[in-house]
Image: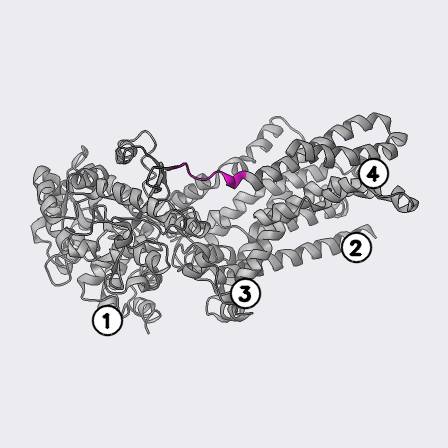
Amino acid sequence: MTSVTIETPAPATRVAANPAQPPGRRRLRRLRPTTWAGLAFAAPLLVYLVIFYAYPLVENVSMSLHRFTRATFVTGEAPFVGLDIYREVIGSAQFWPIVRQTAIFVGASLFFQYVIGLALAVFFQRSFRLSSVLRALFLVPWLLPIIVSGTTWQWMMDADSGILNRFLAIFGVDPVWWLNAENSLMSVTIANIWLGVPFNLVILYSGLQNIPTQLYEAAALDGANRWRQFWSITFPLLKPVSAITLLLGFVYTLKVVDIIWIMTSGTGTSQTLATWAYSMAFGKGTAVIQYSQAAVVGTILLVVALVMGFVYLAVQRRQED
Amino acid sequence: MPSESSRLFAFEPIRHLRHTISERNTVLKTTTQRIGGLVLAATLVGALAACSGDDTTDDTATDGTGDTQLSDIKVWDPYPQYDESSDWAKYVQSCAPEGTTITRTSAATSDLLNDLTSAVKEGNAPDVIMLDNPAVPDAASSGLLATADEVGIDTDGFDANLAGPGTVDGETYGVPIGANTLGLYYNEDVLTEAGVDPASITSWDTLNDALAKVTEAGFKGITFSGIAGEEGVFQFLPWFWGSGATLTDPSTPEAVEAGQLLSDWIGNGYAPKSALTDNQSASWDLFLGGDYAFAENGSWFAKAASELTDFSAVAMPLPGKDGGAAPAPTGGEFVLAPLQKDDAEAHYANASAVISCLVGDENQVKTADALGYFAANETLRAGQISADPIWEPWATSIESAQGRTTDLGPDYTATSAAISTALQAALNAAGDADQVQAAFDAIGG
């Protein structure tokens, strides 16, 4: 930490030295002040990026390559083992089932969040009485602390006396054991969809505002019904906004720990890569503390998110062409 | 230094920049200049402050003899339920030796060991820590703790079963601040109405009979905590040990029997399915609802139970499989001195003073009472129990209680995690014997 802060003012020092440079190299001298000024303006951001992004990332990767235990974590003398821990983690019996669960959790969450969010956004596009109040109410899941909504979902999904089972009983459905090993993935996904709808609603709604109304008027004159208008105007013109919504949604969902942890502590099928990393990093739930293994899973998550970032950039470039 | 450097760093480039910008946009000029300068100056001042921030260490004073004395004592405990204004906080602060002040910090039990790990790594460990007893061997073998000898902690006079977790590989690190254990609470009103005599509950079979009887009478059976992690294992151990299983092999037929017992409770509807995710507070809350006949829970609720007005809750020892009280695990924290890098002697002197104040003969019962614990010394505990009738049912439980780490030392953590996995699977099986068997087979070997 300290070493980083010492290093960072370095470009600025050169800035200060610059005006004192001997004359003669006229062209350089004229070019440099602006370059240095530009660097100086970028410096705060660079400092920030190095301290809060680069340093932790490098530490994380380094941790995944050394075999850390609680004792060696304190002394800092963990032996370097190369990719051994990656092999162990990927080769463990838990890894592929957890990858599968993570894929289902992320995929199902994204799909339903987007579809419901888009449907609501289109619905609210027509303003009617109390529409803005209703739209604001849909933001509630976003505003509530997750500890509150997570606990509430846990109560509602209580197998013996939860309101969901009471409700299902009206239709003669047998009570569901929502939070057991088998069903917990479905349960946390439902809660997470509920949590993510407002985010999709807000972004997609603002995207809809940017679609010129003339297009709809013209389409209506040509005799296109609302369904046709949606598929031929709304959906294609919303593509850039949809892409960013889905990308951000993907990254947010991939790293979800809190709602799952509050509801099930990552037991049964509700264990995802993120909760697995959390439980190993802090020795919580059914895991013993395993710093390096947690760092491996963290790095894998990071690479996946990074790949999605590139996919997004590629999609964006194709749209611009 | 900061102001000088920020002038140099920040405003020189701005002046050059102004030449280029001013021609294009005179309006923006001054604003850009000011904001840019401010941002740069702020960043640099911040960075410099961060560099120099570590210069001020603990207040130290050197007396005539050259020994360093530290006037700030840091104490960490896992009791965040007691805030700054609580009696507990004031009590701890009153233990500060002459000329020192105690700063108390609280964290959740499950976080404290991790917090200590980071603190020792960074060289700013607290002087005194109260650590959950099963975490002590792990902390000691990871080199986080100073030995009792080094610190000067008096380790005599504590019951062997309660002091056990403090000794790792023949070396003693600290002493129990008090002890608690698990028992079986019952709702006297429910049992009376269902026609169950609590005295008849002496074994698993008689307990199961009682559970069948109360559920037939329209009540609910028993609440317990099966949450993933150490807390659920703590609650499982009385059944595990009560069947004759040992921690050295957690996959024996006896262990499976214990898993089957709890699994059947879920399957038969005696216990709530939420036991899978309930912690001990949540399962206690269910019991307080008044519908449940029994609750497996800790002696730390004895006081609250005695003050209930809705129904009368009574405690008894948890039964073993074939009769008699099951060995329950000992709960409660150890009071220890973490390893210090600088001024170790001065830190240890303060630590031993605070520790002897907390658990010395004069104050031990007072400390235990403040936390709802039992004193860890037999004679002192006898006095404590005779002074308050609510402790009476617990006297035999605490004496027959076993340390969780006594058999395995630091390896307990891994075994506990394995048992937690098996227990979760067994509860999920809801009585299915094959699945329970498979759950414990999976952690064998």
Does label 2 lie on the same chain as label 4?
Answer: yes
**How far across and how far down the image is residue B165, in percent?**
25, 57
Answer whether residue B445 is visible to the viewer in this image: yes
Q: Which chain is mark 1 on?
A: B
Q: Earlier in the sequence, mark 4 or mark 2?
A: 4
Answer whether residue A120 is visible to the viewer in this image: no
Horizontal relation, residue A305 to residue B373: left or right: right
Q: Is residue B289 above or below residue A70?
A: above
Residue indicated by mark 4 = A218
Quarter of the image for residue A34 reads top right
Cα gap from disc 1 to disc 2, whole angstroms:
63 Å
Residue indicated by mark 3 = A65
Residue indicated by mark 2 = A318
Q: Amino acid at mark 3?
A: Leu
Q: Secondary structure at mark 1?
A: helix
**How far across and how far down the image is residue A29, in percent?**
88, 43
